[in-house]
Amino acid sequence: MSECESCKNKKNYPCPNSCGYMGVCDGFEPKPITNAERIRAMSDEELAEYLDGVCHDLWQMFVKDPKKMWLDWLRQEAQDA
C-alpha cells in the first residue's frame, strides 16, 4: 500500500479520509484550501454577497442594488477579454 499524503505520521497504510483505511487514524491533517479554491467553491449568491461586501460603498453611488448587479453579472455568458 502507498503512504497517505495527508498523514502527519506518514503511516504506510491508506488514511480513512483519502484511501479507505478502516481503523482510527490520528494523523490525518486536511490540506488547507487556497483563497482561489474557496472562491471557486462559492455559489453565485455567495460570490455576489462577497463582491458586494468588498465594493458596496463604491457601487452604491451608481447602482440601486449592487448585490443584484453582481448576481446578474455572474450569471451572464462570459466574454473573451
Image (cartoon, grey):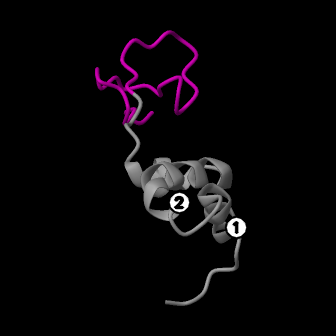
Q: Report crowding for label 2: few under 14, some 14 to 19, many 20 or more residues within 10 A (C-alpha).
A: few
Residue at the spot 64% in from the left edge and 65% down from the top edge: 69
Numbered mark located on residue 7 in the image: none
Above/below status of 59 relative to 51: below
Q: Secondary structure at mark 1?
A: helix
User: Which residue does the image show at 45% across and 55% down from the upper left?
Assistant: 57
Residue type at numbered disc 2? Gln
Q: Mark 2 or mark 1: name the one nearer the start of the chain.
A: 2
Would you say 54 lies left or right of 80 here?
left
Q: Position of residue 46 (x, y in %)?
A: 61, 47
Residue at the left extreme of this rendering: 9
Residue 32, x across and y down, in percent: 37, 37
Q: Nearer the viewer, mark 2 or mark 1?
A: 2
In the foreground, 28 or 66: 66
Please, what is the dominant secondary structure of the magenta stretch? Answer: loop
Q: Residue at x 30, y 26 (%)?
A: 10
Say whether residue 63 is left or right of residue 57: right
Camera-nearest residue between 64 and 53: 64
Mark 2, residue position: 60
Q: Is residue 71 magenta?
A: no
Rendered image quadrant of residue 64:
bottom right
Quarter holding the N terminus is: top left
**Disc 1 residue type (three-letter):** Asp
Identify the magenta region.
Answer: 1-29
Q: Nearer the viewer, residue 77 or 41?
A: 77
Q: Residue furthest bottom?
A: 80
Q: Quadrant of residue 67?
A: bottom right
